[in-house]
Image (tube, rainbow, N blue to C red):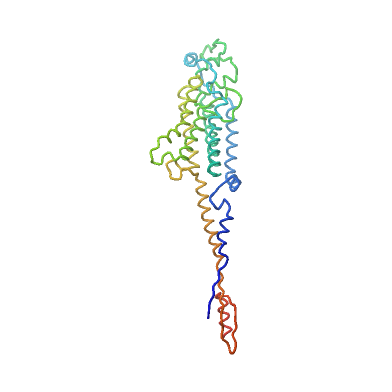
Amino acid sequence: MLFVETTGPGFMSDLFEAKMPDIQLGVHTLRSHGTKVARFHMHDWIILILLAIIDGCLNIIEPYHRFVGKDMMTDLRYPLKSNTVPFWAVPLIAIVLPFAIIIGIYFKRRNVYDLHNAILGLLFSVLITGVITDAIKDAVGRPRPDFFWRCFPDGNDIYNNVTTEVICHGEKGVIKEGHKSFPSGHSSWIVGTEDFYHPCAGSFAGLGFLAWYLAGKIQAFDHRGHVAKLCIVFLPLLCASLVAISRVDDYWHHWQDVFAGGFLGLVVSSFCYLQFFPPPYDLDSWLPHASLHAMSDTGNEVQLQSTTNSLQSRPSVIDTVYVASEGQNGIHMRDTSAILNSMEAGWRH
C-alpha cells in the first residue's frame, strides 16, 4: 500500500497578510478609525458644547458688585491701559498653536486616537478652565486695579455721603468688567472687545496641556538625562507666564489674580491630559490610552483571524491505495477522514 500526501494552497496565509487592512496592521488612520472614534466619543463632544454654552451665559450675567469705598480707591487708581498682548492673539497662542502641533504629529505617526484624544483633551482643558474661572469671577466680584478710571472716566469721583461707597457714572460694560479681577482667565470663544479679554488661566490651560503633550511625545523623562527635552517642555509654560505677567503690567489684574488663574489652568490641564494619556514618565507615554487598548484588541483579532485562516487552509490528504483483488488490480481514491474510515470498515464487515 502506497500513500501519497498532497497539501492545499500554501499561499493563503500570504494572501491574507497582503490584503489585511490598516485596522489589522496596527495603523489607526482617519479613514479606518475616524468614524468609530467619533461615535465612541459623541457624548464627550456634546458635553463640550454644553460647557461652551454655560461659559457664554456666565459672561452675560452681571457679576457680584463688591463694596468699594472711598478709602479703597487709592489702591485701585492705576491707569486704564490697552492690552500688551492683543485679545485676538491669546486664542492663537493657547489653542491654534497646540492644534497645529497635534495635527503635525498626526501626519507623521498616522494615529487617529492620538489626534482625536489630544484635541478633545485640549478643548476640555480650555473650556473647563473657562467655566470655573468665569463662575468664580461672577461670584467674587473683585475690582480691578484700574477700577477708579472705569468708574470715573472723567476723574470726578462721587461717593455716598453715608457709606462712602462709590457712585459710578462710567460706561456700564466697562464697569461690569471692572468687577472681574479674580481670578485671571480666558474663554476661547469670546469675541470682539477688550472687556472680555481674560488670558491668564486660558493660556496656562492650553499651553500647559501642550507642555504635557510634548513631554509624552518626546519622552522627556526617559532617565537618559537629555536637558534639551526639558527645554522643549518648559517653552510653552514660559510663553504662558509672559502672557500672565503682561496682565499685571497692564494693570488689568492683581498679582494674586494671575497666580490663582495660572495655578487653576495648570491643574485642569494636568487632569485633562492624564485622562487621555499616560504620565510622561511611562514607557508608553507617547501613545494615548485608547490607542493602547485598540492595539490590544487588534492583536486579539489578528490572532483569531490567523487561527481561522489556518484551519480553513488545512491540507487535505488523499491516499492512493493499490488493492490486490482476485485476478485484477483496482485503484480507489478515498478521503482519510475518520467518519469515512468508520463507514468503510462497516461495509467490509
- Who is closer to the viewer here, 220 or 189? 220
Quarter of the image with the C terminus in it: bottom right
Query: Residue 48, how many percent across, how many down?
Result: 58, 37
Q: Is residue 124 above or below residue 142?
A: below
Q: Which residue ends up furthest to the bottom in the rendered image? A: 327
Picture coordinates of residue 262 (x, y %)? 47, 29
x 58%, y 39%: residue: 47
Classify residue 311 by image quadrant.
bottom right
The count of marks equals 0
Nearest the viewer among 238 and 106 is 106
Nearest the eye: 199 or 237: 237
Above/below status of 225 relative to 192: below
Rendered position, 164 above or below 193? above
Residue 136: percent from left, percent from top: 51, 29
Residue 76: percent from left, percent from top = 49, 16
Residue extending farthest to the top is 156
Above/below status of 194 relative to 42? above
